[in-house]
Amino acid sequence: MSVDRRTFLKAAAAAAAAPLLPGCASAPDASAGPVTLSAGVGRQALAEAQPPIDVWGYDAAVPGPVLRFRQGERARIVAKNALPEATTVHWHGVRVPNAMDGVPHLTQKPIAVGGEFVYEFDLPDAGTYWYHPHQAGYLQVARGLYGAFVVEERAPIEVDQDAVWVLSDWRINPDGTQREDWATFRDLTHGGRIGNVITVNGRKLGEGEGLSVRAGERVRLRLVNAATARIFVLSFAGHSPTVIAYDGQPVAPHAPEKGRIVLAPSERVDVLIDCMAAPGSRHPVVESFYARFSGNIGYLAYRDEAPLRKEPSRAPIALPANPVPEVNLAKAERHEIVFEGGAMGSLREGIVEGKKIPIRQMVQDYGLAWTVNAVAAIEEDHHHTPLLTLKRNGHYLLAMRNDTSWHHPIHLHGHAFRVVARDGKPTPHQEWRDTVLMNPNESVDIAFVADNPGDWMFHCHVLLHQAGGMMATVRVA
Ligand code: C2O
Ligand code: CU
């Protein structure tokens, strides 16, 4: 038995013996400062009276701890690998230096079994972020490796409760075990691996369970979509949430269209909710994206306490802007990017390892079904020619076209970008984001200043689409 194998078994035994957090309506917080984060295997029940299932998690729980820091601080996180395979940690949305971005082979060597890697970086932006492996994400994230990463403003807005909901889903067999079908042909070529059980902070919430609130209070709820494929469209019955940030980046406070909050995989939305209903009442949080699975994912559960105030708080709610460089659209250089492939698409061939091959061969020989500007990238091989080479501090507009019948949340590492137009029409909020959802056959223009040097991933966050070729490298030199 190799040392690695023995270390793993010991870690696995320790993880199995550790009391796993039951998962609750607000995830546990790790204090700021030096942090260790251990990726390992364990068992966790997704609901009361359910048998525990095998999971992979950080610090023996799904989700991992909420890592909380303050804007301007330097994060130092020792990531340990007690998994049976190599991993990395990516700090999704945090504008880190390239060497800290956690992309195997591209920015670092994978963390070997039993090994560790020290991530250390400054935190220029406040906001809601998250962390997850960037190695075989379609499998490692699906098994439970993810957690929220919160950077508090230097002067936070005034709220009575600051809560985090990490949303995810699982594919569970009738006998309660998890289906280990991580990469089927159907999921690869369709909408990814969508589960049949939704959890909030690792827990399938029962009737009336959810976020405990007091009447009259103002809650800041940080929503994180950690699912590998599922899009959430949430509405809060009897309440009118106000959106104050997308992907950690402040936006002019506004009511979401039709009261529905859209969260594609990897996206975050910060909402403020003034809880003005009656003490003791319960109000469902309804998910409505997929007709087949829609339903309540949890509740706002009012405690039986006298209201904290009679009128909603009047404290200001606009968040101070982060120091993201403003992009000048007039001088931005334009690049066109076309996404193709998948079922019901028109893609006939793609470029794999420099050779043009028919889609049938892409799928059969390589498990690839998607392209970015005609190229299907192989995930383990991060040495492809960059899709784009951008000049440092240059201003860029990426005119992206989704030439597929599927939704794709497109994520750029190392930068925040403005979502400037959809199908040629300016967006109402011109929001900053790190991930933008492209609807089937939609065009989306994003713009940014390429101020962070390095080779950055640019990919779909439906993680099977990413593994299936929908990814590329953007070089800032
Ligand atoms: Cu959330 Cu490339 O990652
Ligand atoms: Cu996709």
Image (cartoon, helix red, strand yellow):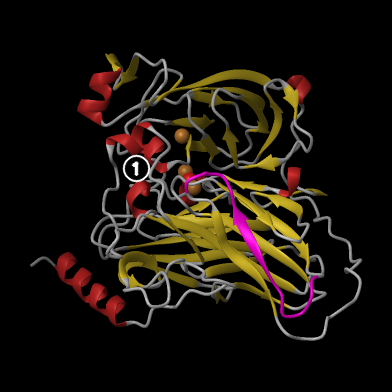
Residue 87 visible, this angle: yes
| Left or right: where 384 falls relative to 324 | left
Q: Quadrant of the C terminus?
A: top right
* The residue at label 1 has a CB less than 8 Å from ligand 1: no
Q: Quadrant of the N terminus?
A: bottom left
Q: Foreground: 295 or 86?
A: 295
Span highlighted in magenta in the image: 277-292
- 442 relative to 448, above or below: above
- Crowding near pointer 1: few (<14 within 10 Å), some, many (20+)? few
Q: Residue at x 33, y 50 (%)?
A: 139
Principal secondary structure, stretch drawn in magenta: loop
Residue at image coords 63%, 52%: 234
Rendered location of residue 419, percent (x, y): 69, 34
Image point (91%, 71%), residue name: 311
Specify whether 198 is left or right of 82: right
Q: Amino acid at mark 1?
A: His
Res. 135 in view = no
Magenta span includes 286 = yes
Q: Is residue 259 above or below residue 9?
A: above
The answer to which image quadrant residue 190 occupies is top left
Q: Is residue 194 magenta?
A: no
How many marks do you count on the picture? 1
Q: Position of residue 322 (x, y in %)?
A: 74, 50
Q: Is residue 278 above or below residue 434?
A: below
> Residue extending furthest left?
1
Which residue is the site of mark 1? 105
418 or 237: nearer the viewer: 237
Report the residue at 66% width, 19% height from top. Answer: 333
Q: Position of residue 299 (x, y in %)?
A: 62, 67
> In terms of secondary structure, where does tag 1 sit?
loop
How far from the left and from the top, in percent, is residue 200? 52, 64
